[in-house]
Image (cartoon, rainbow, N blue to C red):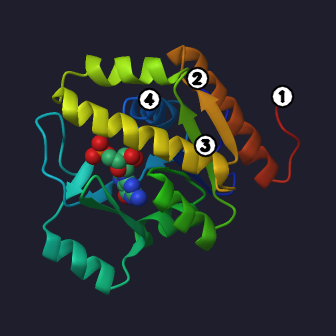
């Protein structure tokens, strides 16, 4: 268990990365290891799959419900990803930040850009595959889609990586080759970022 205290000021942690890069595994590992951390459950219009748990992975809503949240200015950010809408409920995030929590958002580059514009103190990490070839293998290994859909995701992943690299939204890039090593690297970055926000010296260099 990491030495993180809920007495520290809240921090918004954004984790992004292309499909198949393993960001959900990393995100959930950070949620478990960091005391005082909470995962922001996004709302989405995408159909629920058998692997999804409503209210835990996402809150599944209709197009009308989503639009009502946009019109009511209830979302911190929202974006269209692969033809479906995704958004982050704003009040929930702000409440938990005010309580000194580490609030984790697993969102795409468009969403990260919007959040950074509103809350520049957010800390954003982009997870990279070790190579394009490995990413393609991982997308195929999930056995979720046919080859045409895999190729579309692969093209989208390459575009997203390019977009993330060319912008100034991300504070750090972590390569997920070895899963445990990538988790440790993200933990270390998070500890340093929280310590910096607390005005203390980083715990370790
Ligand atoms: P999936 O449907 O495969 O879980 O997620 C598809 C993509 O949507 C991923 O890149 C994921 O990070 C992104 N995503 C999930 N929730 C949100 C959100 O609330 N806002 C934004 N902008 N992207 C999201």
- Identify the element where label 1 is drawn: loop
- Residue labelled with disc 2: 182
Residue 91: which quarter of the image? bottom left
In the image, residue 22 sits, relative to residue 125, either above or below, namely above
- Residue labelled with disc 4: 21
Q: In x, y percent, where is residue 1?
A: 58, 25
Instruction: From the image, state whether disc 4 or disc 1 is nearer to you.
Output: 4
Q: What residue do we see at 13% from left, 47% from top?
A: 48
Q: In x, y percent, where is residue 83?
A: 24, 58
- Residue labelled with disc 1: 204
Rounded to the nearest angstrom, the CA distance separating label 4 from label 1 is 27 Å
| Residue farthest toward the bottom in the current orientation of the protein | 72
Instruction: From the image, state whether disc 4 or disc 2 is nearer to you.
Output: 4
- Identify the element where label 4 is drawn: loop
Q: What residue do we see at 14% from left, 76% from top?
A: 64
Rounded to the nearest angstrom, the CA distance separating label 1 from label 2 is 17 Å
Q: In x, y percent, where is residue 144?
A: 18, 28
For residue 56, say whether it is visible: no
- Identify the element where label 3 is drawn: strand
Instruction: From the image, state whether disc 1 or disc 2 is nearer to you.
Output: 2
Q: Is mark 4 within 8 Å of ligand 1?
A: no
- Residue labelled with disc 3: 125
**Which residue occupies the foreground of this view, 15 or 39?**
15
């Amino acid at each position: 268990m990491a030495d993180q205290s809920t007495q520290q000021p809240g921090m918004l942690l954004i984790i992004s990365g292309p499909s198949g890069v393993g960001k959900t595994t990393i995100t959930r590992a950070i949620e478990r290891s960091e005391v005082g951390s909470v995962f922001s459950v996004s709302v989405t219009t995408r159909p629920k799959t058998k692997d999804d748990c409503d209210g835990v992975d996402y809150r599944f809503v209709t197009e009308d419900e989503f639009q009502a949240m946009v019109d009511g200015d209830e979302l911190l950010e929202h974006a269209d990803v692969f033809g479906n809408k995704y958004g982050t409920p704003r009040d929930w995030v702000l409440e938990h930040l005010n309580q000194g929590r580490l609030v984790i958002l697993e969102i795409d580059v468009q969403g990260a850009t919007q959040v950074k514009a509103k809350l520049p103190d957010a800390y954003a990490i982009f997870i990279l595959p070790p190579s394009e070839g490995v990413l393609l293998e991982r997308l195929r290994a999930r056995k979720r889609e046919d080859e045409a859909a895999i190729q579309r995701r692969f093209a989208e992943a390459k575009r997203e990586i390019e977009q993330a690299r060319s912008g100034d939204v991300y504070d750090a890039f972590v390569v997920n080759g070895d899963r445990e090593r990538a988790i440790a690297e993200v933990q270390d970055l998070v500890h340093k970022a929280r310590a910096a926000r607390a005005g203390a010296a980083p715990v370790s260099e």
